[in-house]
Amino acid sequence: MSPNHSSSQPVRCAVFGIAGYGSLHLNSLYRFAEEGTVQIAAALVRDQAEAPDDYDRLLRMGCRLYTDAAKLFTDFHAKLDLCVINTSIPSHYAFARQALEAQAHVFVEKPLSACPRQASNLKEIAITADRFVAVGFQLVYAPEVHRLQAFIQEGGIGTIKYGKGLGLWPRDKTYYTRNAWAGTICTDEEWILDSPITNALSHYLHSLLF
C-alpha cells in the first residue's frame, strides 16, 4: 500500500457511499475486516436512511461516519491507505482527486471521470503522489477473459484488424429517473455524459479494448 504502511497492520480504509451498488464493496470490506486485513476507519454516508443496518454496523466497528467529504479528508489526511469510492458518477473525479491529495490510494467505480482531461489530471496527481488509481472494471479480471486474450495473442483466430461490439440493453424511464444525473449530459457546473455506453455497457467496451 503506502510507503508508511506496514504489512503487519490492517489497511486503513475509507468508504464513500454504502447504499446501492456500494453495498457490494462494503460487504467485501466487512469480510476483510473480519479477517483482520482491513480497518474501515471512515465512511461518507449522506443519507443514513438508505442503509440503516450498515450505518449501525459501521458505528459498532468504530468507524467514524461523515456527511461532509471535506471534513473526512481533513480529519484523515495522510492517515488512510485506501479510499473506496462508490458515490454518484458526478462525484468520482473530485473524490478521487481529494483522496490522492490526502495521500491515499484510490479504488473508484467506473467511469473515472466524464472527460479525458480529468482522467489525465488524476494520472498526473497519482504519479506525483506515488499512489494508484484503480477503476471498477471487474470483467477484465475474469479468468475466461484472460484465456481469451491469450488465445488471441497466440494467433488462435489470426491477425486482429479491428474490433466491433453490438450492445442491446434497453433502458426504460425507470432507469433514467432513478437519480438526478442518470442520462444527463451536463449540469451548470460540470460534464456528466452518462449513457448506456459510458455506464453499464462500458464494461464490454473496456473488455474489447483489453
Image (cartoon, rainbow, N blue to C red):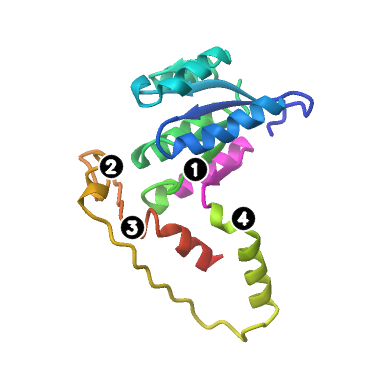
Question: Given contact means CB atoms under 8 Å apart, are the residues at marks 1 and 4 in contact?
Answer: no
Tell which circle, 2 or 3, labels the residue nearer the N-terminal end: 2
- Residue at 40% x, 46% y is 113
Q: Which residue is mark 2?
A: 190
Q: Hey, what amino acid is under mark 4? A: Tyr
Query: Mark 3 and mark 4: span between their CA atoms?
Result: 21 Å
Relative side of 181 to 10, left or right:
left
Q: Hey, what amino acid is under mark 1? A: Leu
**Residue 104 visible in the current orientation:** no
Q: Residues within 10 Å of mark 4 (few under 14, many from 20)?
A: few
Q: Which residue is mark 3?
A: 196
State the image coordinates of residue 163 (x, y, percent, origin top left): 48, 76
Question: Given contact means CB atoms under 8 Å apart, are the residues at marks 3 and 4 in contact?
Answer: no
Tell which circle, 2 or 4, labels the residue nearer the N-terminal end: 4
Relative side of 9 to 116, left or right:
right
Q: Which residue is mark 1?
A: 122
State the image coordinates of residue 154 (x, y, percent, origin top left): 70, 78
Closer to viewer: mark 1 or mark 4: 4
Query: What's drawn in magenta, residue-wise?
Result: 119-137
